Image: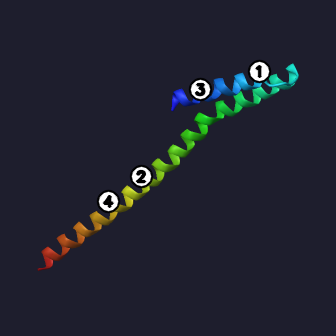
Amino acid sequence: MTKFLLGLGIGAGLAMLFAPASGEETRGRILDKAHDLADLPRKKAAQMADVAKEKADQIAANVSRAADSVKQNVANDQTA
């Protein structure tokens, strides 16, 4: 993934350098792309955190159900 992002950044930079545009416009494009690429890891980290939270919530719910089931079985065994 890192090599892909590096290649993407280099390719975008080279494309902008060789594109027929003014220097100021080209620098603006490069700056915009740099900001976009800088935001990408933060966005990916936020997505991964969301997925991790969802998985943790699912695991917690499963553990809670299992604990309730064990409690119920213990209670049934004590009354029998």
- Tell me the residue at 28%/64% (across/down): 66
Q: Earlier in the sequence, mark 4 or mark 2?
A: 2
- Tell me the residue at 53%/27% (across/down): 3
Q: Amino acid at mark 4?
A: Val
Q: Earlier in the sequence, mark 2 or mark 1?
A: 1
- Mark 3 vs mark 4: in front: 3
Q: Secondary structure at mark 1?
A: helix
**Distance (Cα) linking label 3 and label 1:** 15 Å
Left or right: 15 as drawn, with respect to 79: right
Seen from the viewer's position, the closer of residues 67 and 55 is 55
**Distance (Cα) linking label 4 and label 1:** 56 Å
Q: Earlier in the sequence, mark 4 or mark 1?
A: 1
* Residue 34 rendering spot, x and y as whole percentages: 70, 27
* Residue 61 rendering spot, x and y as whole percentages: 38, 61
- Tell me the residue at 88%/22% (across/down): 22
The residue beneath circle 2 is: 56
* Residue 27 rendering spot, x and y as whole percentages: 81, 22
Above or below, 67 against 21 in this view is: below
* Residue 35 rendering spot, x and y as whole percentages: 71, 30
As drawn, the label of residue 17 is 1
Circles 3 and 1 in contact, beta carbons < 8 Å:
no
Q: Residues within 10 Å of mark 2 (few under 14, many from 20)?
A: few
- Report the coloring of the rendering: rainbow
Q: Earlier in the sequence, mark 3 or mark 2?
A: 3
The residue beneath circle 3 is: 7
**Distance (Cα) linking label 2 and label 1:** 46 Å
Q: Amino acid at mark 2?
A: Ala
Q: Amino acid at mark 1?
A: Leu
Tell me which corner region of the image, top left, top right, bottom left or bottom right, holds residue 80: bottom left
Q: Secondary structure at mark 4?
A: helix
